[in-house]
Amino acid sequence: MALTLRALAAEPALELRVVAGEAGLDRPIGWVHPTELTDPQSFLEGGELLLTTGLTLYSATYAAYIRRLVEADVAGLGFGVGLSHAKVPDALVAVADEVGLPVLEVPRKTPFIAITRAVSRSVAADEYAATVRIGRAQQELTRTAVGRSGAGGVVRRLARLIDGWAVLYDSAGRVREASSARARSVELDVTSLRAGTRVVSHGDDEVVIQTLHTRGALAVGTAEPLDSTGQHIVNTAVSLLSLALEQDRAQRLSLSQLHTGVLELLAAGHRELAREVVPDLPPEPWTVLAVAGSKAARNTLYERLETLAGQVFAAHRGDKLIVLAENDEVSAIVAETGEFHSGLSTGEFPTALRQAEEAAEAARTQRVPMLRYADHAGAGLLGLVDHQAAQAFSDQLLAPVREFDRTGRGDLELSLRCWLEHHGHWDLAATKLGVHRHTLRNRVTKAAELLGRDLDAPGVRAELWFALQIRS
């Protein structure tokens, strides 16, 4: 901790006396600078204890001199007496009190060098203490990083070292690790920070957000601004976390590739060999879920499912994520994690895998979140045809009939549908429609004329029936 004017004045050997600006005695002393210049501003950085005997000062210059020292942001003034002045001039004391500048009276027997040595010893002790603190912190953080607790342990250890809290974010701005429940609840936007450091406020805390060398960001919050030692400690944590996350990313990639290989073993029927590689596959029989979605969304889902090892097995296959589970409850997790189109099937694995992938493609075509293969297969021919292509076919084939119906001159489309539903039976279809069979016959004849088709031909009837089933 930096030496303050109050602490310096309290050292008995120096015999310093406070004569002005007592309210500012808790200012830290950065260094000591003796000078007899009336305007030493150009030679100061701020925070110094300025020492003078007042050799060039007289009553008319006191006010301007004191104000120049305040502008230079000095910590205080040490005025040596017994040479040019028997005591600190009252006029100078009055001005210093007015502007709040501490003034220490230095007796003739106390050499300025003694004050310089006292401050120097304190600065050296502070620098040594900071070096020791940084070294110990680096050791603690490094041991934690290479230990079992990994990135989460580093975040928690860092929070204790800086007496604050810390949150680690991934590249998407989501909380990956937090030092406490309170830290996890902090809401910060870190995605707009591409590189470097930003300082913001959160409640009563100052928060430093720093990007990692690879991806993501680290946010640390403290009640007081970080000193240089704290900044060094945070920089150490940033380096270690960047390295840990890069290693973690490489390990995850290797594990993902391993899971894909195991999935292919299962697809080829080598179940026993697959279980030797991944012993904690979920119990059979499996529910198979094929998930189609963006690569980023699939990766996020994969990372979440990794935490359910033993209950769920997930692997990338082409543009889909394949999930094996004991039941279909995993579909609820899929629905929560992102925008997906999923297919679900059960049974013997190689067949269930193919069926789940087909159902996922159908779900993507139909723009539905999830489709069971049983429902997909039960949709018959319509379920096998691309919906957009089928819609175009229906619109083109039935356009003349629908245009006629829009004139209000007859319900040709409805009549044609009912007639085909009753296999061309005039009386049954007419009764269903509530019209005379001659009316129905006239409508069907008109429809055939508009379509330019022979409605007695089985193929024409099949095409019409298919076209009438398509819904916009």
Image (cartoon, rainbow, N blue to C red):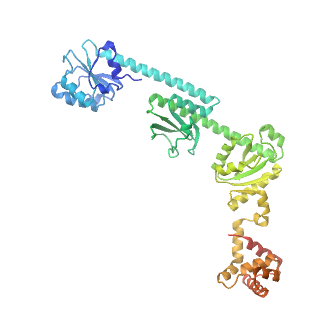
Please tell me in which quadrant of the rendered image residue 174 appears.
top right
Viewer-proximal residue, 103 or 261?
A: 103
Viewer-proximal residue, 259 or 471?
A: 471
Q: Quadrant of the N terminus?
A: top left
Viewer-proximal residue, 184 or 87?
A: 184
Q: Is residue 367 left or right of residue 348?
A: left
- Note whether residue 427 is visible: yes
83, above or below 322, in the image: above
* Residue 438 rendering spot, x and y as whole percentages: 78, 88
Residue at 54 percent across and 32 percent down: it is 237
Viewer-proximal residue, 402 or 24?
A: 24
Q: Is residue 243 left or right of residue 438?
A: left
69, above or below 422, in the image: above
Q: Quadrant of the C terminus?
A: bottom right
Residue at 76 percent across and 76 percent down: it is 464
Q: Is residue 104 left or right of residue 405?
A: left
* Residue 111 rendering spot, x and y as whole percentages: 28, 14
So how many labels did they put on this image?
A: 0
* Residue 179 rendering spot, x and y as whole percentages: 56, 34
Residue at 77 percent across and 86 percent down: it is 436
* Residue 206 rendering spot, x and y as whole percentages: 45, 37
50, above or below 456, in the image: above
299, above or below 464, in the image: above
